[in-house]
Amino acid sequence: MAQDNIYIILWTRKSLYGIIYGGKYVKRRCIVRQFFKTELNNWKIPEIIWLCSSVFIIISLSIYWNDSIIGIIAAVSGVVYVILTGKGRPSGYIFGVVNVLLYAYISLGARYYGEVMLNIIYYLPMNFVGWFVWRKNMDDATGEVKKKRLSQRSALLIFGGTLVAIFLYGEVLKYLGGNMAYMDSMSTVISVVAQILCVKRYIEQWILWIVVDIVTVVMWIFAFFNGGESVATLIMWSLYTVNGFIIYFRWNKDLNRQSADLEFAAVPISEGKLSYYDSGNIK
């Protein structure tokens, strides 16, 4: 009888364990499934082709040039990050964290100290900030983040302050003995400003990112021809440049459409005519 009681107790514990942890496993699977369902929603075929082709280009050319595994992972995660953020998806920041850590390691080997400090001190925490801010400012209709545009006055102030910061930080990097100090400074300072605009969801970020991408491509071209194993990083920044133009025009199109909708909705109702809301366009 005592032995039977022991078996019953063991069976009960095992069942409870299965119910508790099995339930958590099922719940975790549902969360993951819902996450991918949300992230893959509202994608167009050209966008999927661009994402897949970008990853393929990085991997294939990196293997051809015998680049490091770290360089390939950093490049792939970086491209996925910019495409997802360009798509207005907060999940891009997850890949951004991976890219930041690996890219800082690669930049350290190339003695681009400005890039190292930028990624570890600034980009890393800003990726977490961006994740939370974007999650709170989503458009339920599109599944994308709500976009904004700077006023002309704000744009001029940001431009002037950025130029001053580039000069001052360039002097600091020159004193530290870094390679291409002013180019490194330009890339770093503009990146800081662009990341702030990114978190705050302003379209002007993409203009700054394009400038950063072009400057950084030049930097890594020099690193490549000086014997650095950085072909994956060079390809990554080249794809960033192309993606910057694509996403800028996409965001601009979305903002123009939003402005047109607001202007149309604000038109007074003429006698005998239906308003935009009454016509059933907005539900």
Image (cartoon, rainbow, N blue to C red):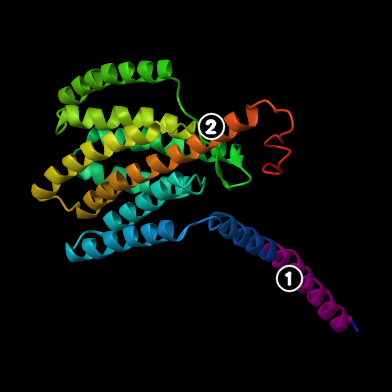
Q: Residue at x 39, y 36 (%)?
A: 123
Could you tell me residue 268's position as x and y percent?
A: 67, 25
**Rendered view: 241 above or below 211:** below
Within-10-Å neighbours for mark 2: few <14, some 14–19, many 20+: few
Quadrant containing the N terminus in the rendered view: bottom right
Foreground of the two, 146 or 223: 146
Residue range (magenta) = 2-24
Mark 2, mark 1: which one is toward the viewer?
Answer: 2
Could you tell me residue 27's position as x and y percent?
A: 69, 61
Magenta stretch, main secondary structure class: helix
Q: Tell me the tag on residue 259.
A: 2
Foreground of the two, 244 or 55: 244
Q: Residue at x 60, y 32 (%)?
A: 264
Q: Which amino acid type corresponds to the residue marked 2 in the rendered image?
A: Ser
- Which element carries disc 1, helix, strand or loop? helix
Q: Which residue is mark 1?
A: 18
Q: Disc 2 and disc 1: Cα gap in Å?
A: 54 Å
- Magenta segment includes 7: yes
Could you tell me residue 210's position as x and y percent?
A: 30, 37
Quadrant containing the C terminus in the rendered view: top right
- Which element carries disc 2, helix, strand or loop? helix
View extreme (left): residue: 226
**Rendered view: 108 above or below 167:** below
Foreground of the two, 272 or 27: 272
View extreme (front): residue: 272
Confirm or deny contact between disc 2 and disc 1 (CB under 8 A): no
**N-terminal-most mark, 2 or 1:** 1
Could you tell me residue 242's position as x and y percent?
A: 29, 47
Q: Which amino acid type corresponds to the residue marked 1 in the rendered image?
A: Gly
Foreground of the two, 160 or 183: 160
